[in-house]
Each structure stands twice: as C-alpha cells, then as structure tokens.
Image (tube, rainbow, N blue to C red):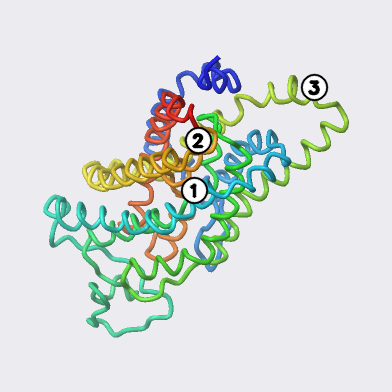
Amino acid sequence: MTKEDQITNNRKMTGIFERFLTVWVLLCIAGGIILGKVAPGVAQSLDGMAIYVNGAPVVSIPIAICLFFMMYPIMVKIDFSEVIQAGKSGKPVFLTLFINWCIKPFSMYAIAIFFLGFLFKGFIGAEAMDLVKMPFGLDLAVGAQHGAGTVVLADGIKMLEIPLWRSYLAGCILLGIAPCTAMVFVWSYLSRGNDGLTLVMVAINSLTMLVLYGVLGGFLLGVGRLPVPWQALLLSISIYVALPLVAGYLSRKWIISAKGEQWFKEKFLHVLTPVTIIALLITLVLLFSFKGEVILANPLTILWIAVPLFIQTMLIFCLGYGLARILKLQYEDAAPAAMIGASNHFEVAIATSTMLFGLSSGAALATVVGVLIEVPVMLMLVKICLKTTHWFDGN
C-alpha cells in the first residue's frame, strides 16, 4: 500500500458534506449574501451580538460559537503524546515561522501595492478617496496632512481622507501579517496532516503574533506605530484556539477514562465526523449575511482586491510546500506547514481593520474579501496536497 493510500484510508471523506464540500461552500456563500439582502434585520441582529472592547465589536458571538463546533471535533482527536513528539521536530516549526514572519508580510505588501497601487489603480479610481478613522491618540487640525491623507470633518467628526487604493492596501497588509490560528486545523485535517504538529505550530504562531503583529503592521502601513488591539488579539486566540483546545483535551480524557479508548474512537468520534464541516458551512452563511450588502455594492472592487490576495496565497503555499520537500519533511508535516502560511487569521484582520479604520472603510472591505476567497482557494490547495503525497515518499 502506498503512502497516499495509507493517508487516504486514515481519514476517509465519504460523507455527502465532505465529498461535495466545494459545492456546499459556494452555496453557503450565496445563501449568506441572499439572507443579508432579503432579511437584513436578521443579519444585523446577529452581527450586533458581539463582545465589545473600547466600543468596537471584537468577537462575534454567533461566529465564535460556530468556530468552537468547527474546532472541537478536531481538538478532541489530538493525542497530546503526539504533540510532544511533534514538537521535537524543529524543521517544520522553523519553516512555518520563516514563511509567516520573514516572507509573507513583505510579499503581501509588494504584491498588493503592485496590483492595487499600479496595475488596478485606474480601475479603482486614481482620484477615489476613502474616509477612515484618525489614528489613536492623534489630534490634528482640519486640513492637516498625515502620511498620504488629509484631516477632514465628516458629520462633525475628524476623519482622515486617504486614497481608496491605499485603504485596500491596508486591509491586505492586515491579512498578510495575521497567520491562521483557527481554520488551519480544518485544512490540516482535510489534507491528512499531522494534527499534533499543527497544534504546536499554531501555538507558536499565536504567541509570535502578539509580539510581531504591531511591529510589522506599523512598519508596512507606513503610518508610524500601529496601535495593536491587544484585547482583541488575546480574546481571539482564547476563543478560537484555547477554549476548544481545553474542552477537547478534558473531554477526551474523561470519555476515554469512563468508556474506554475503543468506544471513544468507534462511537464518539463517528458521531462528531460531520460536525466540523457543518459548522464551517454555517459560519460562511453568517459571515456573508453580515457583509453581503457590501459585496453586492462593490462587485468589481471585490475582483481587484481578490487578485493580489489569490496570488499571495498561491505564492506562499508553493514556497512553503517546495521548501518542505527540499528539507525532506514527511508529507504529514509538509502539508500543515504549507497550509498555515497560505491561510490567514481573517477574524483578527477584520476586527483590527474595523477598530483602526472603521467598519465602512476600504481596509475592512479588503479583509472581508480575504474571507470570500479563503475557503475555496484553501480547499483547492487541500486537493493539491492530497494529489502530491507521492512527492514525499522518499523522505
């Protein structure tokens, strides 16, 4: 039996949700947009259910619940003895840190500024402007210049008027400096990667993000020091990673102790199998019901923003996957190492862009476009991984 056969048999994707996941994803995106259009009151009510920090919505409670049920079935399957063993392997961890913090933020900046600030600038509108929040702690007179913007008065509030393409660039940057710490578990699982190693890499990247997110953001945005919403980051990591992790660990330990490992694997896990996929689909409906109106109002803008984000995702994946092969990693380690670099922590990016620039800003729209292309593109990369497991046979 080949390695590919062994991996495929290890995690069969035979359910109707799993076999046609791409179709369901597209239907849920369309369904979410339609729901936001025909029943805006429902979407607004759900969107208003959030944890607020400094008056800004940081964590959507409905999304947090969905993400918990998306993550828990994966977390509960993790044997922490495997995590300890995975942590001893330095190459995959080094690779993901190198890609996420030495390459990805700068490649995102370069690609986004080329497409948005040069190639697509005429389509976006060279003279088009966007109103964004004044940077925290900054109090300038109306008409004053700040970076590429001008202080103006809008509805009695001081705002910063900046070129629209620069606002989109800011959103792309916020995506580029936020490595995935939640959805990557889904991509790793679907690609039959090493769950223990994925957990180790996510934990390290989450801690690293607390240190480097503001530093790289401030540098790349070019507006001085970026005020990092530490509360938002800590809440996001706690809710999207720590909570399902602790729940999975404790319930696994209790169930195996009470019912035995065989019952846990053959009965309990069997019931949980479709939960992750269903939770993912519900999450997509919710996300796009919240932002459907914005997307419908800016169809071509979505395309201009999606192009650099797509190219960035493919570039980072190919670089990570290629380096994993050069480093002679096993497939089970190579797949999540490449996936965590290619995907983004869009929850943090959306929260940060909203807090820093405003809900209606071009930066916030760009982070929503990141969600729009994330799932279909990552599902495509999962299929690429599964088709290329033989590349790592000799490792």
Q: Quadrant of residue 275?
A: top right
The amino acid type of the residue labelled 2 equals Trp
Residue in the image at 63% along x and 54% along y: 238
Query: What's the distance in space between the residues labelled 2 and 1, CA to CA?
Result: 10 Å
Of the image marks 2 and 1, the number of the one nearer the N terminus: 1
Q: Label 1: how many residues lie within 10 Å, few (<14), some (14-19) or many (20+)?
A: many
For this view, does 110 lie left or right of residue 121?
right
Disc 3: which residue: 262
Mark nearer the viewer, 3 or 1: 3
**Given the current orientation, which residue lies at the most extreme front position?**
394
Q: Is disc 2 in contact with disc 3, using a CB cutoff of under 8 Å?
A: no
Tell me residue 76's x, y (percent): 70, 36
Local SS, label 1: loop
Q: Quadrant of residue 204?
A: bottom right
Nearer to us in this view, 172 or 356: 172
Tell me residue 216's x, y (percent): 41, 66
For this view, does 242 lie left or right of residue 13?
right
Q: Label 3: how many residues lie within 10 Å, few (<14), some (14-19) or many (20+)?
A: few
The amino acid type of the residue labelled 3 equals Gln
Disc 1: which residue: 180
Disc 2: which residue: 187
Nearer to us in this view, 198 or 308: 198
Residue 22: which disc?
none
